[in-house]
Image: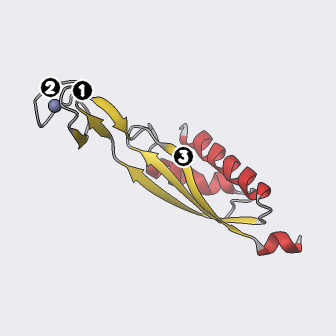
Amino acid sequence: MHELSIAASLIEIAEDAAREAGAGRVRALRVRVGALSGVVIEALEFVYAAAAEGTLCEGARLEIEAVPARVRCRVCTYEAVMEGVGPFICESCGAPGPEVVGGRDLELVTMEVDEHEAANS
Ligand SMILES: [Zn+2]
């Protein structure tokens, strides 16, 4: 279950950013997860709460933005959302083997922090 290490590293990034911003607590994390990132969203949600325990992210909301896989035809540059798993054939010209142009994302997009607590501590 590599989602646990992914959750841990997202939390680490958020904690660093929160400290840098002088924030006392992270209230929400917004994470972009691509269909081709290899991350199972349900699994990430499942392990997140435990991974966040004892960190600045404890109790923070985890918002996941699922990004579909996108492919672009190498022949006619037609772009489409890839459904399911390959092999994929271009809907426009029928050429096989398109280039993957999106869906590998795995990143922290934004976060919400509580700045008041930092001022008091
Ligand atoms: Zn094509």
Which mark is nearer the camera, 1 or 2?
A: 1
Q: Residue 20 in the image: x percent, y percent?
A: 78, 55
Where's residue 22, x and y in %?
A: 80, 62
Name the residue that disc number 3 marks: 107
Q: Quadrant of the C terminus?
A: bottom right
Q: Judge the density around disc 3: few (<14), some (14-19), many (≥20) Cα neighbours within 10 Å.
A: some
User: Please, what secondary structure does the residue beneath circle 3 have?
Assistant: strand
Q: Are marks 1 and 2 in contact (CB under 8 Å)?
A: yes
The residue under label 2 is which amino acid type?
Ala
In whole angstroms, how far apart are the C-alphas of marks 3 and 1? 27 Å
Q: How many marks?
A: 3
Q: Is residue 101 left or right of residue 106?
A: left
- In front: label 3 or label 2: 2
* Kind of residue indicated by mark 3: Glu
**Residue indicated by mark 2:** 95
Judging depth in this view, the residue of 64 and 91 nearest the camera is: 91
Tell me where residue 61 appears, x and y as whole percent: 58, 65
Mark 1: amino acid: Arg
**Image-quadrant location for residue 62:** bottom right
Ligand 1 falls in which quarter? top left
| Label 1 lies in ligand 1 vicinity (Cβ under 8 Å) | yes
Viewer-closest of 26 and 47: 26
Tag shown at residue 74: 1
Considering the numbered disc 1 on the image, is that residue within a helix, a strand or a loop?
A: loop
User: Quick one: label 1 or label 2, which is nearer the N terminus?
Assistant: 1
Residue 50, x across and y down, in percent: 64, 54
Q: Residue at x 85, y 72 (%)?
A: 119
